[in-house]
Image (cartoon, rainbow, N blue to C red):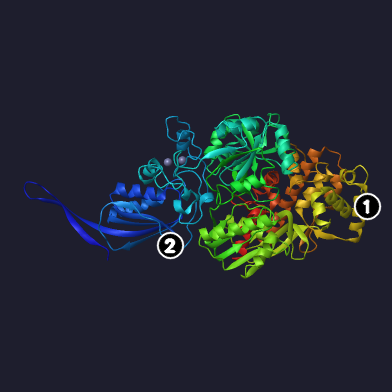
Amino acid sequence: MGRRILHYEAAVQALGWEIRTYRLVMIERRLITVSGVVQGVGFRPFVLGLAVRAGLSGFVGNDGDGVFIEIEGPTEAIERFVATLAAGSPPLARIDGMTVGSVPVRGGTGFEIVPSMAGTGRAVLVSPDVRTCDDCLRELSDPTDRRYRYPFINCTNCGPRFTITIRTPYDRPQTTMAEFTMCGDCRREYEDPADRRFHAQPNACPACGPRLWIEGGVGSGDAIAETRELVAGGSVVAIRGVGGFHLACNAFDGDAIAALRERKGRIDKPFAVMAGDLDTVRLHTLVDDHEERLLTGRERPIVLLRKREGSGLAHQVAPGIDRLGVMLPYSPVHELLLQPGDVWVMTSGNLGGEPIVTGIEQARRQLSRLADAFLMHDREIHVPVDDSVVRSHRGAELPVRRSRGYAPFPVRLPVEVGPVLAVGGELKATFCLARGRDAFMSQHIGDMENLETLEAFERAVRHVKGLFRLEPERVVADLHPGYLSSRWAEGLGLPVTKVQHHHAHVASVMAENGVTDPVLGFSFDGTGYGTDGAVWGGEVLVCDFDGFERVAHLAYVPLAGGDASIERPYRMALSHMRSAGVAWTEGLPPVSACPPDELSLLARQLERGLGTVATSSMGRLFDAVASLVGVRHRVTYEAQAAMELESLAAGAIAPPAFAFTVDDRQRPWLIETSGLIAEIASDRSAAAAKARSFHEAVAEMIAHVALRACRETGLDTVGFSGGVFQNALLLYLVVDRLESSGLRLLTHTVVPPNDGGLALGQVVIGG
Ligand code: ZN
Ligand code: ZN
Ligand code: FE
């Protein structure tokens, strides 16, 4: 079927009629479907080029499942075509699946790209937004090019994708570029298979594409030059970018940054910066090879780098910590705005705790109090996407926030799941929609503590559902009865599975490492609802995707007045001291930090247990120690005390002077902190040395518990998850102690260890 003999190819000697060879050429036609990231990445042009070069006829198109190809010609050529298709696809493409089947031969000549079809099958993958490619950068700076200094230059290999995609299949009418009609020149490029912009959906030029303008400038007419002038003069400019607005100001200008902090109500939470080029980054931070690759990669995340002290950047950028979040320009607008030597604060344009602002009107309304001027453009942002944040850990990527450049790229699951939605936790909310082995982790949405974020969450769920034609049949949520996300999940009318927070953390690190067999998991974070109603956070679990057993945990101490004790680490220190039998002696840092009235109130509260809840939180222990060594008594942002403690410890060398004790007379083992607290309280070393010793002690305890629990349970794999493992120093010290133990160590390289990665674990447990 589907075959016919086209001709006998006979080579006949002209004279003598001697037949030298016979060759039978079989003509066949095949239907090939390709799934994965194959739309918006130049896949169809690639197929066309391949087919034309091989002399094959047929067509290629996008549908809701990916790309379909019909190809006709000699068997051998078809087979070569299929092999090249799989091996040599374009840089941004990722093939997840391919089917090849025979169909009846139709004859015909030539190969063409046919219009997209809707399709109704499996998920088509949408490419994340990609930084400007080198070819486009060259044209951007070439005075003879028709796109010289055009702020929206892009091609098949670069430009906006996810943020402009309204629905799939990914084609111009389905994106926010639909409203721009291509001019003749752009149209020609778009239709020319030999052109770099062949079927580049966001293709545009100064004659036909989006434009840039400034509001609140001086009226010189050059929006880029005016923005540069304003920033240089100390103004804050709201810049509409790829996934939303940034608030920008000069990172050398302490007054400008102080003004921005004042207006944003952001007291000392670090700002990220954008530097003009890599050399500029090197002037202000210490960058190793791996960090350089992270900085210059196509995702262009914010990379947390070690500061070079005294480099001239204003200390207000990231006070109190030794790291600086740095990114390089990733859109043509940024490329035009920042020159070598420039460093600008670039922080998400939003009101405290709310989602990033994307719309022009919304920005005029909500950001006018924060910004002196607006750099606007008219390419609509359909999907709000914040900048991603990563650290480097032993030559691997340690994600802190997985968003632009990464979302909505799926995470490959080690198990099959039904159509399922996992709604994550509360802080750093992300959700995960999954089916089969594809887990679509959403972009970072924000802290789910207000209506605006919940609405953004709902919108994002709707969008991703539509994009991947994925209708969940069940929903997974955190066990915490008070989480907005959990309550929202219950209102969906679908079967709900509740998953314990720390179990989900360990499952997430298992899933991204492809592990399904039981592991020993260290799940250390600030807060998670425990099955006994306590606030968990220092948990050692034996678990797989079906269940968990609590093997060990930090001994409970009272958390007095929930939020108050989270915002004021000295309260946690005082609670730990009291539990450890350490007197609240005048002169000890937490005692001095606590106002006298509060001190006596707290004493009564702890005594009677009124308004307190038991906690085994490792995050709160870091807070307590930060206060105890005098580093930080009040925090203005999440994990501030722990980050400052890590910064201090990273610069110090000290022996492990403190130790936890493990009480193994019962299951779960109790990891006692009283000895450690007493030691730290009486130690007379400098704060940095104590901070370092504390980190060493935590690492030592982890190694001890890991070795012992693995020996007893026969497990050979240990996972590390939870926000505490965003602490690269701690992770380093732990791996250092365990890497020669023969145990397999699982750390995060795909999703964040913090609650931003929680939904992935929820999916594999509940799906
Ligand atoms: Zn390009
Ligand atoms: Zn044009
Ligand atoms: Fe957590």
- The residue singled out by tag 1 in the image is 600
Q: Furthest-front residue in view? A: 219
| SS state under label 2 | loop
Q: Nearer the viewer, mark 1 or mark 2?
A: 2
Residue drawn at (69%, 41%) of the image: 370
Q: Is mark 2 within 8 Å of ligand 1?
A: no
Q: Position of residue 12 (x, y in %)?
A: 12, 49
Residue drawn at (58%, 59%) of the image: 461
State the quadrant of the C terminus. bottom right
Question: Circles 1 and 2: CB distance less than 8 Å?
Answer: no
Looking at this view, is 508 or 472 the one in front? 472
Q: Is residue 456 left or right of residue 31?
A: right
Q: Quadrant of ligand 3?
A: bottom right
Q: How far separated are the C-alphas under marks 1 and 2? A: 68 Å
Instruction: Say if 253 sits above or below 463 in the image.
Output: above
Q: Amino acid at mark 2?
A: Gly
Q: Position of residue 619 (x, y in %)?
A: 75, 51
Q: Position of residue 95 (x, y in %)?
A: 45, 53
Residue 717 appearing in the image: no
Q: Residue 119 got which mark? A: 2
Q: Furthest-left residue in view? A: 16
